[in-house]
Amino acid sequence: MAVVTFYAIPLPFGGIAHFGNTVMWTASILFGGLVGGLAGGIGGAMVDLVLEPVWAPFDIFCKLASGLACGLVSIGIRSVSKKTTIQIILAVIAGAVVNVLAYAPVYWLLFGPGAAGLWLARSIIPGPALVTYIVTPIITIAIMRAYPRVMDFRNSRQGIRRYI
């Protein structure tokens, strides 16, 4: 997560656009929301400590919430089918919506209500994030097809499932 996030595009009103969410949401779908959310939160905070330190304390909570939402929607996925493809897409949408809503109060706190409004308005027309929304299901499905047993860990009693 941290390595992918280092390749980031600065946004004009603060923050960065990157493929970290793709890694986080893919991990949330494959290994559970807790694993994906922690990977996103810790990885994002590590990068922000170097690139944008003001965001680091908030990343852990905002990304954890986003990863958990994505993981909850994707519970029950065991293999690739039309139904699970739709569920994967819905999981990414849930993660994206929670991500946007989780960061809105942070923008408000750091930059004021106008910045929070711009953040929410920008999120309606996702721009660079649209690539992430499209790429995440493609990568997730490709991994599931290449490694069909990847879902065994999440769905096992010994796996992460007992923690979500």
Image (tube, rainbow, N blue to C red):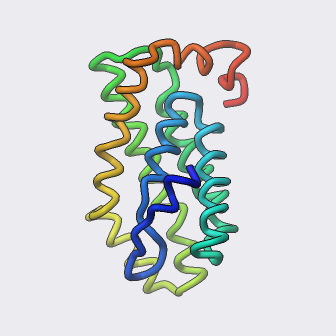
7 to the left or right of 157: left
Give the quadrant of residue 109: bottom right
Give the quadrant of residue 142: top left
**In the rendering, at what x and y percent does residue 100 appear?**
45, 61
Q: Is residue 142 above or below residue 17?
A: above
Question: In the image, what residue occupies the spot 62% across and 46% down?
Answer: 39
Q: Is residue 16 above or below residue 135?
A: below
Question: In the image, what residue occupies the spot 59% across and 37% down?
Answer: 33
12 to the left or right of 55: left
**In the rendering, at what x and y percent does residue 52 appear?**
58, 75
**In the rendering, at what x and y percent does residue 51 appear?**
58, 73
Tell which of 108 and 21 is nearer to you.
21
163 to the left or right of 147: right
**In the rendering, at what x and y percent does residue 87 appear?**
37, 29
Q: Is residue 112 above or below residue 29?
A: below
Question: In the image, what residue occupies the spot 47% across and 29% down?
Answer: 74
20 to the left or right of 12: right
Question: In the image, what residue occupies the spot 49% across and 40% down?
Answer: 70
Quarter of the image where the C terminus is located: top right
Tell which of 105 and 36 is nearer to you.
36
Q: Please tell me how many numbered marks the rendered image carries.
A: 0
